[in-house]
Image: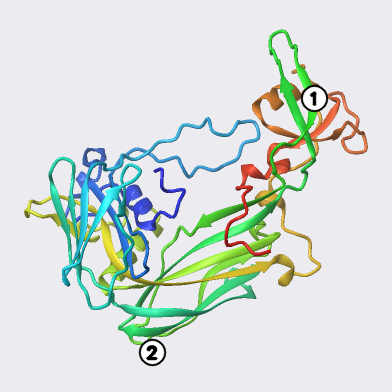
């Protein structure tokens, strides 16, 4: 799923996991198999933000998606794992029609990724319908969608707190006030960005050329690093469904809604942390859809509690032909705020959390070549990009042993932050 690494909506990932469990009409459980792969998946969240709006189209796929398998193996070079993907729906024609006569057309960018030809924002009290014509000529149409109201995030703040499980950490809360219409149903999402500092970074690193693993000829030297890889930044998008409803409350305002809790031993707050929280005002139909989706995703087995027809996709064939379609088209009001804080703001004079979620950064040494009864030689590790230089061998750093080499080194993760993030400072970042 090539856009999952970007800000790709939650609905898509869950629907792919559910396979054929989502439908407009009732499905027999027996149809929830690979034979049902290939149904159209529509992911479209239109907002009242003036921006280029986006629609994602794909086909359901019964294959396993391994893109989120991020387990780091210090003996496995990065980028050689097999990744599966789902087939994007390419070559479609899309337009969004408002009952005020407005029409917005979309053009495909990357495969299955459709962008509005011009920026636009949804308007309150206007109904919209999405029309889709696939490359095969099949036409689909969404139910009418409309903004339910508007609400503004007025405060985003963090406090030192204890979780329900007794974990000490930082809780992040949100307050918002209604503005127009009837905002009663809310969904929240966030993008968190954290600073990474490689603890064993050195100015110099290994440079291996002319290495022949058969003859063992090689040129190993130390060179000054050509890339800044001591400090990096990583951004992660929330993966759960966080909703609240104020129906039945005395007011539609949101007070002290906790959008994130981070334990004090979590590596991501070690240096500097930022979170951008987005509040979506939903229709009651969209709220219900995501509630059911949340229940499915949190069940022990995604299929254990599925009732046929329980999850309604608001897209159907325009000619009335029965066809199962996955996904949802939604109209939302969006309000957002960003927050920054440092570890010492809440835990002054305390030791920082373990690096990289507790990854072992012990100093190591090894002979240049593979030898019996010794760990993997240094040269093969350098060739595979598995280690970073730390120092010339010193028994005060690594105790004298049978498998000593000329250098002390660490797993590359501990001396090169680019395995965990991007070395480009984000535009919004404030130190």
> Quadrant location of residue 307?
bottom left
Is label 2 in a helix, a strand or a loop?
loop
Q: Residue furthest top?
A: 215
Quarter of the N terminus within the rendering = top left
> Quadrant location of residue 216?
top right
**Residue found at x 34% / y 40%:** 86
Give 337 or 298, whichever is nearer the viewer: 337
**Residue 281 has which mark?**
none
Residue 66 located left or right of residue 125: right
Q: Is residue 211 visible?
A: yes
Badge 1 vs badge 2, beta-carbon distance below 8 Å: no
Position in image of residue 381 (x %, y %) = 70, 26
Give 6 or 30, whichever is nearer the viewer: 6
Q: Which residue is mark 1?
A: 221
Against 30, is 256 above or below? Answer: below
**Residue found at x 84% / y 25%:** 405
* Classed neighbour count for the residue bearing mark 1: other residues with Cα under 10 Å, few (<14), some (14–19), many (≥20): few
| Colour pattern | rainbow
Against 293, is 110 above or below? Answer: above
Is label 1 in a helix, a strand or a loop?
strand
Position in image of residue 398 (x %, y %) = 87, 35
Q: Which mark's residue is nearer the viewer, 1 or 2? A: 1
Quarter of the C terminus within the rendering = bottom right
Q: Which residue is mark 2?
A: 251
**Residue found at x 87% / y 23%:** 402
Badge 1 or badge 2: first in the primary sequence: 1
């Amino acid at each position: 799923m090539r856009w999952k690494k970007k800000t790709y909506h939650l609905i898509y990932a869950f629907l792919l996991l559910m396979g054929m469990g989502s439908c407009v009409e009732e499905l027999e459980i027996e149809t929830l198999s690979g034979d049902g792969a290939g149904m159209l998946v529509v992911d479209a969240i239109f907002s009242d933000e003036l921006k280029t709006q986006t629609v994602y189209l794909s086909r359901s796929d019964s294959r396993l998606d391994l893109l989120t398998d991020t387990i780091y193996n210090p003996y496995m070079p990065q980028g050689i794992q097999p990744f599966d993907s789902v087939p994007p729906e390419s070559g479609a024609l899309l337009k969004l029609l408002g009952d005020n006569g407005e029409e917005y057309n979309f053009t495909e960018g990357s495969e299955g990724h459709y962008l509005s030809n011009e920026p636009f924002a949804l308007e309150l009290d206007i109904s919209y319908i999405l029309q889709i014509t696939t490359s095969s000529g099949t036409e689909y149409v969404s139910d009418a969608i409309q903004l339910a109201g508007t609400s503004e995030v007025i405060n985003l703040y963090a406090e030192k707190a204890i979780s329900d499980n007794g974990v000490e950490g930082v809780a992040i809360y949100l307050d918002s006030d209604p503005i127009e219409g009837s905002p009663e149903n809310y969904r929240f999402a966030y993008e968190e960005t954290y600073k990474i500092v490689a603890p064993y970074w050195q100015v110099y690193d290994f440079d291996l050329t002319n290495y022949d693993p058969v003859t063992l000829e090689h040129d190993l030297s130390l060179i000054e690093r050509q890339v800044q890889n001591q400090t990096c930044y990583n951004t992660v998008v929330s993966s759960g469904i966080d909703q609240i409803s104020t129906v039945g409350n005395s007011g539609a305002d949101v007070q002290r809604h906790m959008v994130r809790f981070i334990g004090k031993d979590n590596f991501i707050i070690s240096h500097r942390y930022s979170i951008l929280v987005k509040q979506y005002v939903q229709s009651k139909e969209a709220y219900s859809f995501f509630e059911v989706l949340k229940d499915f995703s949190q069940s022990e087995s995604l299929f254990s509690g599925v009732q046929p027809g329980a999850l309604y996709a608001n897209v159907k064939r325009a000619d009335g032909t029965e066809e199962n379609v996955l996904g949802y088209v939604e109209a939302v009001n969006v309000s957002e705020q960003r927050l920054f804080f440092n570890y010492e703001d809440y835990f002054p004079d305390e030791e920082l959390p373990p690096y990289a979620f507790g990854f072992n950064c012990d100093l190591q040494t090894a002979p240049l070549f593979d030898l019996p009864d010794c760990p993997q030689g240094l040269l093969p590790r350098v060739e595979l990009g598995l280690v970073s230089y730390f120092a010339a061998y010193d028994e005060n750093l690594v105790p004298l042993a049978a498998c000593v080499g000329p250098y002390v080194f660490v797993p590359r993760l501990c001396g090169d932050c680019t395995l965990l993030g991007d070395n480009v400072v984000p535009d919004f970042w404030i130190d």
